[in-house]
Amino acid sequence: MNMLGSMVDYGVIGLLVVLSIVAVAVSIERFRFYSRTDVNTYQTIQELESALTGRLHIVGTIGSNAPYIGLLGTVMGIMHTFYAMGSGGTTNVNDIMAGLALALKATAAGLLVAIPSIVLYNLLHRRVNVLMLQKEAINERQKL
């Protein structure tokens, strides 16, 4: 059952670190792509939308699932604490607090990944909407 503590520290928190790196990397790539995008090079709005929304779902998925991964680490940390309490036969307050701190560390890591990811997703989505509106305005002007 000691493996549970290591899984929270290295497995859950390690996964959250990797996911945060992926979310930031995809966001940077998307921001750079949007800054180079000329809406006039796309024939239809559908082509533009397809190009603009590529890989955007990755950031949104990470942002929406990171709290659940943190919660998984919390549950595993609490399970580890209860197992240690039950198998030891004593209720050493220091051991209990250390186990609960481990559990709360996973929750905090999940939130530290989720909040920036959702902010980045919203910023990216707003930029997509602006570029789409620019293309629609150009198409409307060409019809006149």
Image: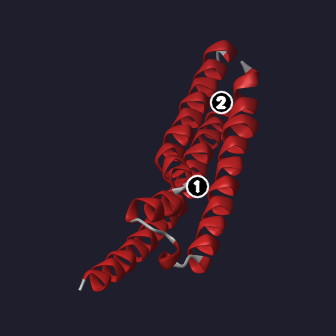
Is 35 drawn above or below residue 84 in the view shown?
A: below
Q: How is the image coloured?
A: secondary structure
What residue is disc 1 on?
Answer: 113
**Of 104 and 31, which appears nearest the observer?**
31
Is 91 drawn above or below residue 37 in the view shown?
A: above
> Where residue 37 appears, x then y in whole percent?
56, 76
Q: Secondary structure at mark 1?
A: helix
Is 90 drawn above or below residue 12 in the view shown?
A: above
| Residue type of the residue flagged with mark 2 | Asn
Q: Kindly check if marks 1 and 2 are in contact, taking CB atoms under 8 A apart as contact.
A: no
> Where residue 29 appears, x then y in whole percent?
66, 66
What residue is disc 2 on?
Answer: 92
Q: Which sits earlier in the primary sequence, circle 1 or circle 2? A: 2
**Of 79 and 89, which appears nearest the observer?**
79
Q: Say which quarter of the image contains residue 73.
A: top right
Most distant residue in the front direction: 143
Image side of residue 71 versus residue 90, left or right: left
Looking at the image, which residue is at 56% across and 48% down?
Answer: 110
In what quadrant of the picture does the N terminus appear?
top right
| Residue type of the residue flagged with mark 1 | Val
Q: Say which quarter of the image contains residue 75.
A: top right
Looking at the image, which residue is at 53% across and 59% down?
Answer: 117
Looking at the image, which residue is at 61% across and 43% down?
Answer: 106
In what quadrant of the picture does the C terminus appear?
bottom left
Q: Secondary structure at mark 2?
A: loop
Looking at the image, which residue is at 67% across and 53% down?
Answer: 22
Is 127 drawn above or below residue 94 in the view shown?
A: below
Distance, label 1 to label 2, CA atoms, is 33 Å
Rate crowding at label 2 as few (under 14), some (14 to 19) or many (20 or more) other CA atoms within 10 Å.
few
> Where residue 41 appears, x then y in whole percent?
53, 74
